[in-house]
Image (cartoon, rainbow, N blue to C red):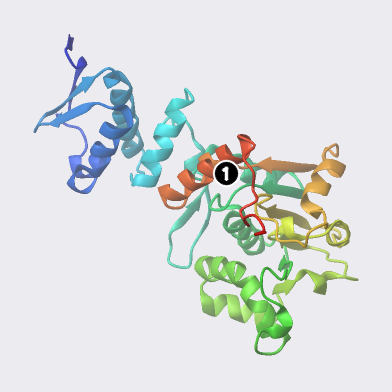
Amino acid sequence: MENDFGEVIRISLDGEHDTGELFGIMDANLKAIETHFGVEAVLRRDEIVLSGERADEARDIIKDLSRILDRGESIDRQKLEYVMTLHAEGLSYADSDFSRDILAFTHRGKPIKAKTCGQKEYVEAIRRRDIVFAIGPAGTGKTYLAVAMAVNAYKNKEAEKIILARPAVEAGERLGFLPGDLQEKVDPYLRPLYDALYEIMGRDTALRLKENETIEVVPLAYMRGRTLDNSFIILDEAQNTTREQMKMFLTRMGFGSKVVVTGDVTQIDLPEGRASGLLHAERVLSGIEELAFCRLTGRDVVRHSLVKKIISAYESHEKSGASGNVRGRKKH
């Protein structure tokens, strides 16, 4: 049925889920659907009435949300945004099974799962390949999922050690000018790795394993000259490695080990004139079947919804060919 506002669709809620679970606190999810599709939604006790030219699309989203609840998942704004993103690409979140696969549990008992199709492909690549490169913007779970897989491998006795490395690139501040000894100087660069470890394993457990060197969190420079057997090795922020550093790191791999390399090529902090080892590795190694390159995108962002919009805005700006020179012109 249609009126001046387009199609009108009625969805019966009789016997369905609690509207608070479905539509969120104060119907926040329903309001987000209204805004996204430009429809009007009237929620009654036993039905919801949708009106507008895209009412059928809004109905599909609501049905997807109901099916998500049917399989025991909760719905938050982040998940709703992703459901609508997939819908725009002709895909259904409810038809996928990636969110059912539990990778590990945090020390508080919260299950860790892939939340997007891109993350699912990334996790599967880690399972199938001995070396995996994950390239994508901030907020796509590159580091967190790699650490979760490393912890899982250790708990399943698939790895005897977890080694987490990061280049200590001087982005705006000189290490020599920072207070403290060498470890105190490099710790800020390693903080994201510590944060992921503490959330998944718990601070006390992680520190105990670090103390007995089952877990190592080290600057990349400390990897030189080593051969690492039976280890799960993660190189984070790999866009800030040089070609020589990347080659050095990859050739540390020993028998029974797995390597995950993560990086965001839009945030390279190397000095001008130094090529990124991550970009170089992608060109040089992409033909080797035994390793995988996973490209995560803005749709895989699992942080605040604004992060996704910020990334999309920067991507659009770069694709438009706009100048990146924001230093201003020299005064005459």
Residue 18 seen in render: no
Residue at the image point whose x is 76% and y is 55% from the top: 258
Residue 142 rendering spot, x and y as whole percentages: 61, 53
- Quadrant of the frame with the N terminus: top left
**Residue 331 position in % (x across, y down):** 65, 59
Question: Looking at the rendering, which quadrant does residue 108 occupy?
Answer: bottom left
Q: Nearer the viewer, residue 329 or 311?
A: 329
Residue under the point 88% across and 62% down: 248
Q: Residue furthest top?
A: 1
Residue 26 in the image: above or below residue 225: above
Left or right: residue 320 compared with residue 125: left
Residue situated furthest left in the rendering: 45
Q: Quadrant of residue 150?
A: bottom right
State the residue at coordinates (59%, 49%): 137
Residue 201: percent from left, percent from top: 54, 69
Whether residue 260 sits left or right of residue 255 in the image: it is left
Q: Nearer the viewer, residue 302 or 211?
A: 302
> Could you classify mark 1 by the number of other residues whose Cα lies within 10 Å: few (under 14), some (14-19), or many (20 or more)?
many
Residue corresponding to mark 1: 119
| Location of residue 150 with respect to 67 vertically, above or below | below
Residue type at numbered disc 1: Gln
Q: Residue furthest bottom?
A: 180
93 or 27, nearer to the observer: 27
Check the image and report above or below for 91 versus 186: above
**Taking 99 as reference, is 224 above or below it?**
below
